[in-house]
Amino acid sequence: MIHEVDEVLKRLLSGGALTGTGVEVAFDAPTRDWAARRNAPAIDAYLYDIREEVARRERGAIAIRDDRGIVLRRRQPPRWFRLSYLVTAWTKRPQDEHRLLSAVLATLLPHEMLPPEELTGALAELGLSVPLTVAAAHTDSRSFAEIWSALGGELKPALDLTVIAPFPAYPEYDAGPPVTEGAGVRIRGTDGSLEGSAERYHRPRHLAAREDAASGTAE
């Protein structure tokens, strides 16, 4: 799931206001050694934090149906995770870095919600939209200064990019076959003899509705 989010971000950051610029998009830790090896303009989106969005956790099971609406399988709902990226621009001059960060903002701000058709792989198969937030208020207890200190680099302008992505729950399991007949009731007396000559059956409501619709009696 994480690598699929990386692919989506790389496509976004390579397009928009940065289309045709040839700026490299990387996901490396921006350490001193990495920065020293830069010889061309680059945008770096470093994944520095992964946390579950507990408030989005769902219970129960999700039914997977065929074209007729019959339940074929069931699976647990996906778990949602907050992926936090430190987005920085790398050039020879601070002014050029500021221009690149402005281009990143112009590219990402229109994409507050990524629809399934803009996603790839398992993310797209879930059919869920993925929220994306850039440069929001930093509510985490850790500051950017602490992150840069841990990386061994110098503090520089950066954008905090957050993607809340669903992680598929595995495995799926087969559901039981659909009900095609009602429950039969046979009544016996205290002496064990049958009361009445026929068993009584209850038609499930969904079958009754289908039969009524087929006969033209449904409202």
Image (cartoon, rainbow, N blue to C red):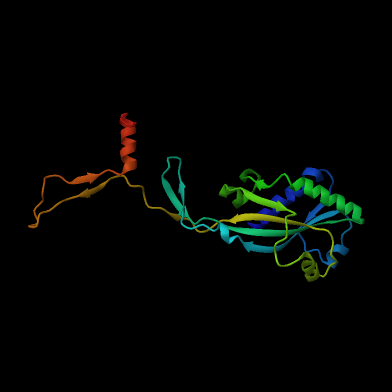
Which image quadrant: the C terminus?
A: top left
State whether residue 207 is above or below residue 139: above
Position of residue 68 relative to residue 130, above or below, is: above
> Residue sitting at 77 percent across and 43 percent down?
16
| Quadrant assignment, res 208 | top left
Q: Where the N terminus falls, by quadrant?
A: bottom right
135 horizontally vs 124: left or right: right
Camera-side residue of 112 and 122: 112
Q: Given the current orientation, which residue lies at the most extreme left position? A: 191
In terms of image quadrants, where is residue 173? bottom left
What is the total number of numbered labels drawn onto the structure image? 0
Q: Position of residue 183 (x, y in %)?
A: 25, 49
Q: Residue 41: x percent and y percent?
A: 87, 53
Outermost residue, top direction? 216
Q: Name the spot of residue 185 as percent of width and height, x first.
A: 20, 50
Please state if 70 lies on the left or on the right of 1 as rendered: left
Tell me the residue at 87%/54% (across/down).
97
Pick the residue in front: 206 or 22: 206
Residue 88 appears left or right of 212: right
Q: Identify which residue is drawn at 83% across, 58% down.
A: 157
Q: Position of residue 128 (x, y in %)?
A: 58, 48
